[in-house]
Image: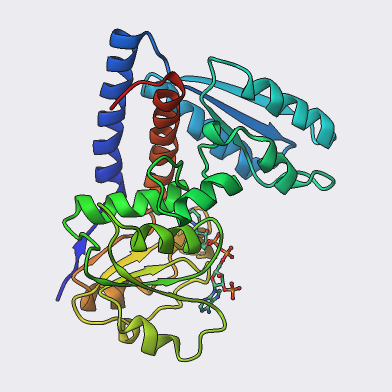
Amino acid sequence: MAADIISGKEIGDEIRAEIAQRVSDLKKNHGLVPGLATVLVGEDQASHMYVRMKNKAAGELGLHSQQITLPGDTSEDELLGVVAGLNGNPDIHGILVQSPLPDGIDEAKVLLAIDPAKDIDGFHPLNVGKLNTGSDDVLVPCTPAGIIELLMRSGNDPAGKHAVVVGRSNIVGRPMASLLVRKGPGGNATVTVAHSRTPELGVITRLADILIVAIGRPETITGDMIKPGAVVIDVGSNRVDDPETEKGYRYVGDVVYEEAAEVASAITPVPGGVGPMTITMLLSNTVAAAVALAGIDG
Ligand code: NDP
């Protein structure tokens, strides 16, 4: 069996077109321009690249975006002051403080300082709590939200299926499980969560109709760990050396793609699967936050 490829690039483009239309309608009908602020502290090159990509994507879809770049020796109090300013700024509806923060700044404290209504990462404990209590009025973490879109838009509704999530991080695994078990569209699955202390992982993964792997260990899930016909979502993005490539490295997932594609009915590639969805959902959250803050219905 050759699995269908679930393309995050194609589905992401589809959602971005919808966001651009929504942004244009909001501007025309309500004079509202959703605004994203990204805050970057220090010189981490990968963080600079991610933030550039986020602001570029926001601009392309018609959102207002503002990047605040602070030196690596910024104090926690200074950063909290910047966050407070953005909380009170009516042109900004989504605030993203890029991780990692330099030593000496308590990320949890910064996270708590962000207005939950502008917490487009969905990491504030209020949003985490709302997600876990089934509230609709919640900003959901972008990667798992993107995975639900991938499943629904590729015709793989999780309702009534057994979903196995491998990984229990606060960014991916836990919110993923919460979304899948939620009552309502995109949810209603029976969910098992596995992690590094799960014995006989293959016994568990082979039970999955939908297998979502977010462990950050290259090519850990082999073909024999997958139930024939399962849908496989590979969140992993692992850089591995490859002298055969021009750059000397390439990215692989947490799943052995070639083996899995023989067994699964559908699979996300790496790259080009889950990755492109994350920024798209960040923009989607920014628009949702703007609409909620402005009190616009629908
Ligand atoms: P974390 O390191 O925070 O969490 C990894 C989880 O996997 C932990 O719960 C850990 O268990 C579990 N785990 C580790 N090894 C094994 C194993 N051998 N068997 C079973 N479970 C295992 O990672 P993240 O959740 O942040 O990210 C996971 C992957 O997803 C990474 O490759 C990351 O780069 C990628 N990612 C991709 C994104 C995208 O946009 N494409 C966005 C976010 C992440 P325990 O809790 O017991 O330690």
Residue drawn where x is 33% and y is 20% of the image: 23
Residue drawn where x is 29% and y is 49% of the image: 149
Residue 171, given in percent of the width and then of the height, sits at: 53, 55
* Residue 74 in sight from this viewpoint: no
Could you say which is closer to the camera, residue 184 or residue 5? Answer: 184
Task: State whether residue 56 is above or below residue 110.
Answer: above
Q: Tell me where residue 222 sits by quadrant.
A: bottom left
Residue drawn where x is 26% and y is 30% of the image: 17
Residue drawn where x is 40% and y is 21% of the image: 295
Q: Is residue 160 left or right of residue 278?
A: left
For the C terminus, the image quarter is top left
Q: Tell me where residue 261 sits by quadrant.
A: bottom left
Task: State whether residue 51 is above or below residue 213.
Answer: above
Could you say which is closer to the camera, residue 167 or residue 2? Answer: 167
Residue 209, given in percent of the width and then of the height, sits at: 25, 74
Tally the numbered discs.
0
Q: Is residue 76 left or right of residue 241?
A: right
Residue 127, given in percent of the width and then of the height, sits at: 52, 45
* Residue 13 in sight from this viewpoint: yes
Q: How is the image coloured?
A: rainbow
For the N terminus, the image quarter is bottom left
Residue 267, given in percent of the width and then of the height, sits at: 27, 65
